[in-house]
Amino acid sequence: MAAEAMKRIKLGSQGFKVSAQRLGSMSMFAFYRAPKLEKDMIALSHHAINTGITFHDTSDMYGPHTNEILLGKVGDDDEEEFVLCITYPAKLLLQ
């Protein structure tokens, strides 16, 4: 899907808009299978941005912080903007 054609939706009540499709990063370095190469995950993130996916979802419990560091590198060398949504394990924090 071309970047121009990617549907954007309102997120929250402040009028902030993100792509309707998101890139989840749970399996980039942890979970499911062996960790992926950093260069491949950076390439995947750039591809997502270039196709109009501006909503990237991660959590510090996947690394910890591994995906956030990786996506920081993506942001350093990408001219396009993207939104980083970070979820956290609230239940673990309360224990």
Image (tube, rainbow, N blue to C red):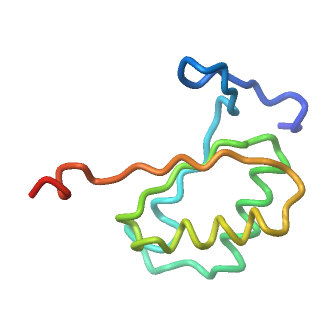
> Residue 5, percent across and down?
86, 28
Determine whether 31 is above or below 48 in the image.
Answer: below
Q: Quadrant of residue 53?
A: top right
Residue 18's quadrant in the figure? top right
Instruction: Determine whether 79 is above or below 22 in the image.
Output: below
Number of marks in the image?
Answer: 0
Which residue shows up at 58% across the image and 72% down it?
Answer: 69
Left or right side of 82 for 84: left
* Residue 50 x/y as whole percent: 85, 50
Pick the quarter of the image with the C terminus: bottom left
Nearer to us in this view, 71 or 15? 15
Toward the front, the furthest residue is 14
94 displayed left or right of 25? left
Viewer-side residue, 15 vs 32: 15
Q: Position of residue 40 (x, y in %)?
A: 70, 75
Q: Quadrant of the N terminus?
A: top right
Q: In this picture, is 39 found above or below 16?
A: below
Seen at 50% across and 74% down, the residue is 66
In the image, residue 2 lies at what x, y percent? 88, 37
Q: Residue at x 17, y 50 (%)?
A: 91
Residue in the image at 90% along x and 31% along y = 4
In the image, is 48 to the left or to the right of 34?
right
In the displayed structure image, the side of residue 59 where residue 4 appears, left or right: right
